[in-house]
Amino acid sequence: MKRLLENISRRDFMKYCAAAAAVLGLSELEFATKVTEALAAARKKPPVIWLEGQDCAGCSISFAGSLNPPFAQMVLDRVSVRYHETIMAGSGHVAEAAYHKTVKEGGYVLCIEGSIPTADDRFCMVGGRSFRKIVKEAGAKAAAIIAVGACATYGGIPAAGPTGAVGVNKIIKNKPVINLPTCPVHCDHLIGTILYYLTTKKVPPLDKIGRPKMYFGELIHDNCRRRSYFDNEQFLTDWNDPAQKNWCLYQKGCKGPDTYSDCPVRRWNDGLNFCIDCGAGCMGCAEPGFYSEMSPLYTAESKRSRNIMARKKAGLIPPQEEVV
Amino acid sequence: MGKKIVVDPVTRIEGHLKITVEIENNKVKDAWSSGTMARGIEALLQGRDPRDAPFVTSRLCGVCFSVHQIASSYALDKAFGARVPWGGTLLRNLAMGAEYIYDHVLHFYHLSALDYIDIMAVAAYKGKDKALNAVKDKIVGLVKTKDTFPLTPRYKPDEFCVRDPDMVISAVKHYIDALSMHAKARNMGAIFGGRTPHYQSIVVGGFTQLPDVNQVAMFRAMLDEQAKFVNEVYIPDVLAFGTGPLFPLAKIGLGGGHYNYLSYGAFQLDKAGKKLVFPPGVIEGLNPADIKIGRFNQKKVTESVKYGWYKKDGPKHPYKGKQVFDLDKRRAYSFVKAPRYNGKPMEVGPLARMLVAKNPDVLGLVAKGVKPGVVARHAARAIETKLVVDACYKWLDMLLSEMTKPRFKIHDTKHWAPPANGTGAGFYEAPRGALGHWVKIKGKKIANYQMVVPSTWNASPRCEKKLRGPYEQALIGAPVPDPDNPINVVRIVRSFDPCLACAIHLIDPKTNEIKKFLVE
């Protein structure tokens, strides 16, 4: 249809409309309008507003690191990024105008990166306005809301600090918020969620705390390749020892038994590596307790870690059945 | 009194930055740089297990994350008495090297380039190159659908913007190519780092992942691709623009500043730490014909909070001063503190490093008439990327030979437990400049944690002596013929590669606790 319209004159177009309208029993004007609308809709890329609050831009960088599909394809072909401070060309009033125009039109996908300070609005100001108010304002007319990364979902590391940092669902309460934790967000989780919404116009099925079940449905522990070492209580204590290289990282603070995410299966950076494979263990960044409850991160001294061992001893984390 | 204009938010940077300039006779007469977001990372570390610090401080910035992990680990290594095995240092350097390569490429193409080209000039491309015509079709296609976000809206291109269709279209192609190149560079970092952003494997005492030969080979192969891009695309682009159409900007020295430069030095090339990729040093008042490098003495560092949202104090050595939060303070305009060296504001970053190193390529450009300023900053950044690429090859060779030794080590496990008490300072060079972390441990917990990061130096507000910070000073005299279109203002600020999330740290406003810090 697009190619056809580009190659025909207006006169030909009206002739075509008259003939088609006669077949469909519509007035010529009505038909021409419908065709134009449909074309406009087909051409119009879904608008996206991306806000950054108390963030480190790590989630933006994670998003920008997608190779398949390429980030360039996402932002130039699939969606219309109206406002994103880290990538947009415009600054200052030019950027602000684009934001306000998009909010006025409504119906956009709203991505929020970073937490929102509640102790005092002045802890995060953008364009001279409080970030908390901007989140409320943008949330009101959004078609879908995605909290991107640990800070925007459950407060993350800033929640442990003095600014009263909270996640998006503590500010926007009357609409569903899709929570994509992990610090930073996994680009597959983000792109997949956006594409799921654009394809189905629906929010993906979520768990009790707002995370898409398709990514956060299974425990890291249940898919961990070091699992048999946990079951046998062979815990790595020396990173230099080749014999221990694949042992369980419980003693190094791994919170895999308490964390839901598909990291062990999906892995990170195009499947190259991820936290547990590089010997550092899971820090529980997909869970609401991150960071405070996971601390100390690198030992088994946290309440969480002690609880994991208590559950193991009580037989509540039974050895994984051997695959025959 | 000239006309005041405010750019807020300054986009295509990391963090939240507001720039106010006063314009008189079409030029910037005065300028104010304000950081407008705070999280209190230093405050939340108080009382924690010190080993958490590299992980937590990594989250200061998601753009250049591993520098904080490393600086933090260096500070803790000292406090713990840990001696990082050479293998651990090499792995840290390789992870860090990957970050430099990704970060500098990202900064030039994705955060800066749009300030220097009229992207719409691609429509006038008449050449036959297939790949370039695909770029033309893509951009023209976007224009036809009337949806060119996020490439527009923008400040109107001014007389300095490059409009030559051949140059612009290859720049736009490289913008798109660089998107996958920076992602691949980060993947390269993840081979050892675990994942990016935010590596996992850098810890007190060394590294957590024993590498295998496959990983070394994979890193090398990926480095080959990066080296090709840096040498054949990035550096030629920067030089072609800087000495070609942007030479007028280079010649007037747009965005010069105070001409004071500081580098802590970084990147060991030998086990003894005698040879560094970036040497340390200080330049107080640059004379390009006769560059005098002073020895860096950290006792000469002071921090001022006179114009920061902190209770009146100082100026004092940053680790002896009190910093108590005060949001209502009159005349304060930033969360960023104002560090000074020997009482002077200092520029840190690639240009500072290359001048302190007396890098012949950068000095050659200066001799050709490229005055220290925005163009020189971009050039220094590109030139040092090559130094890092070359160093990565050396580190890979050294790592491989280290791995063949029977007792190959990556971690000082003997010193993994925190000491009862201790202090340590870690100095490093982040892509954005001189970075310092300081830790004080009491009863095996963090009693105090302090950071002075590159953007604290560069984005600093005024101090007691009313000396402007480096951004502010660099803006003075910049041509702004159209107040609605202050494109030179953002060019200057972006040339420093700002990272505001890093620059701001707070002390607990609830307890208003006074933090004291003593450096050994």
Image: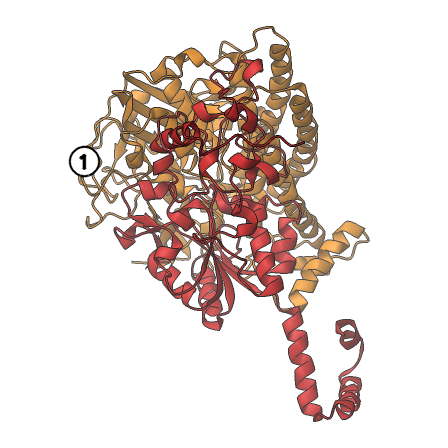
Chain colours: A red, B orange
Which residue does the image show at 60% across and 20% down from the upper left? Answer: B211
Q: Residue A145: image x %, image y %?
A: 47, 60
Pick whichever, A291 or B392, lies toward us. A291
Left or right of B130, for residue B371 = left
Quadrant into which the N terminus of chain B falls:
bottom left
Kind of residue at badge 1 = Glu
Mark 1: give few (<14), some (14-19) or many (20+) Cα within 10 Å.
Answer: some
Local SS, label 1: loop
Left or right of A51, for residue A28 = right
Q: Residue A87: image x %, image y %?
A: 53, 51
Looking at the image, which residue sits at the far top?
Answer: B406
Query: Where is B453 relative to A172, above or below?
Result: above
Looking at the image, which residue sits at the far right?
Answer: B128
Query: Where is B272 relative to B180, above or below?
Result: above
Quadrant into which the C terminus of chain B falls:
top left
The total number of labels drawn is 1
Confirm whether residue B109 shows in the render: yes
Quarter of the figure with residue B425: top left
Identify residue for label 1: B513
Confirm whether residue B263 shows in the render: no
Query: Where is A131 relative to A7, above or below?
Result: above
Q: Residue B377: image x %, image y %?
A: 51, 37
Q: Residue B375: image x %, image y %?
A: 54, 41
Pick whichever, B258 or A220, lies toward us. A220
Q: Chain of mark 1?
A: B
Pick whichever, B19 or B103, lies toward us. B103
